[in-house]
Amino acid sequence: MLGNFRFDNVVEKLSRRVAGRTSRRGAIGRLGAIMAGGALIPLLPVDRRGRVSRAHAASPAEGTDPRAKWQPQDTDIQSCDYWRHCSIDGNICDCSGGSLTNCPPGTKLATASWVASCYNPTDGESYLIAYRDCCGANMPGRCPCLNTEGELPVYRPEFANDIIWCFGAEDDAMTYHCTISPIIGKAS
């Protein structure tokens, strides 16, 4: 009984001290600052440098062992196994009038991107690729690819390539068209 009385006194003194040193407005202000800061988190750039890819696991070609892993190639940029497309989920812009680094005419580049690390079999180096969506022209997709190198569920957006990044495009260009894959640097 005496222990409960001491505990109650300690809790009461602490509560009164906290109440005497803080105000409701101050607590509400701090809570508002935390909520505003949390709302800005999706605006931060997405970085996938931690995933250096050396081998690419995907669908094997017909007539091969389904457990076999294929190596990326560096000759056909319109193919899904081209080394820069290790984490692309969408259409390759080179197939619809664009290139690896430029959107096709009539489309606009989205402001947001996702980054992956892809292995170049020619020089044996891994490079950071900034996948950026081209938006605005609603045309049937050409050269569709679904490469999932290092992909995680959508609740980890920095590692999920299923997100359409056209929400940042200008002038109501919210329609996805294709994805470019420029090199932004070497992966360390």
Image: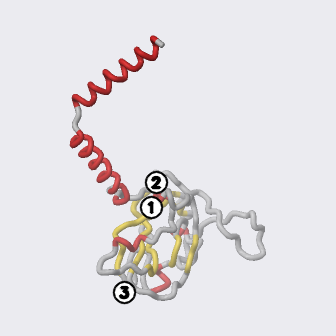
Distance from the alpha carbon under mark 1 to that under mark 3: 24 Å
Q: Is residue 129 visible?
A: yes
Residue type of the residue flagged with mark 1: Val
Where does residue 130 sit, x and y in percent of width and height? 42, 65
Q: Quadrant of residue 18?
A: top left
Element assignment for label 3: loop
Q: Residue at x 74, y 76 (%)?
A: 62
Q: Is residue 127 visible?
A: no
Q: Answer few, some or many: residues within 10 Å of disc 2's Cα (few below 14, many 20 plus, some between 14 and 19).
A: some
Residue type of the residue flagged with mark 3: Pro
Question: In the rendered view, would you say 106 is above or below 159?
Answer: below
- What is the number of the mark on residue 49? 2
Q: Answer few, some or many: residues within 10 Å of disc 3's Cα (few below 14, many 20 plus, some between 14 and 19).
A: few
Question: In the rendered view, would you say 153 is above or below 21?
Answer: below
Q: Residue at x 35, y 57 (%)?
A: 44
Q: Label 3 belongs to which residue?
A: 105
Of residues 139 and 19, the one drawn nearer to the viewer in this rendering: 19
Where does residue 38 sit, x and y in percent of width and height? 34, 52
* Residue reaching furthest to the front: 1
Residue type of the residue flagged with mark 2: Arg
Q: Residue at x 40, y 14 (%)?
A: 6
Distance from the alpha carbon under mark 2 to that under mark 1: 7 Å
In primary-sequence order, the first of circles 1 and 3 is: 3
- Disc 2 to disc 1: CB gap under 8 Å: yes
Q: Is residue 133 left or right of residue 126?
A: left
Element assignment for label 2: loop
Element assignment for label 1: strand
